[in-house]
Amino acid sequence: MAGSGEAACCGGRSQGLHCLATIILAPHRIGGDGDHGWEQGSFTGPHASGLETWFIRGISAGAATYAFRQTAVYNCLTHNLIEAVELGALAPVVVEG
């Protein structure tokens, strides 16, 4: 996932889907909070809001939406920073006006 980053416009939206069969995931958005998060992957279930980190059980899936409200570089990474650095689990998003 590591690289030069994706581009987005201020006011744009993104959606992240996360799943891994063997371990608990803790996706983390640096630069703001998720607007809506579904820990168990079902969009019909209740969602959480205002989360910077959300936890996804092993053998499950989760999703989150986010609106970019200002120009910045936002990073989405695993909350385990050692994994984020060693495995390249970092997804920067460059938001321009």
Image (cartoon, rainbow, N blue to C red):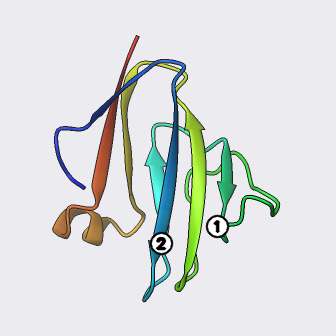
Mark 1 residue crowding within 10 angstroms, few (<14) / some (14–19) / many (20+):
some
Which one is earlier in the sequence, the residue at label 1 or at label 2?
Answer: 2
Q: Which residue is mark 2?
A: 19
Location of the C terminus (image quadrant): top left
Q: How many marks?
A: 2
> Residue 41 or 53: which is nearer the viewer?
41
Question: Which disc is residue 49 wearing?
Answer: none
Q: Determine contact: label 1, label 2, CB under 8 Å.
A: yes
List the single residue furthest toward the top.
97
Report x, y in % for residue 2.
Answer: 20, 52
The residue located at (57%, 50%) in the rendering is 52
The residue located at (50%, 58%) in the rendering is 17
Location of the N terminus (image quadrant): bottom left
Q: Which residue is mark 1?
A: 41
The residue located at (26%, 70%) in the rendering is 82
Report x, y in % for residue 91.
Answer: 31, 48
Report x, y in % for residue 94.
Answer: 32, 28
Please say if 85 is above or below 64: below
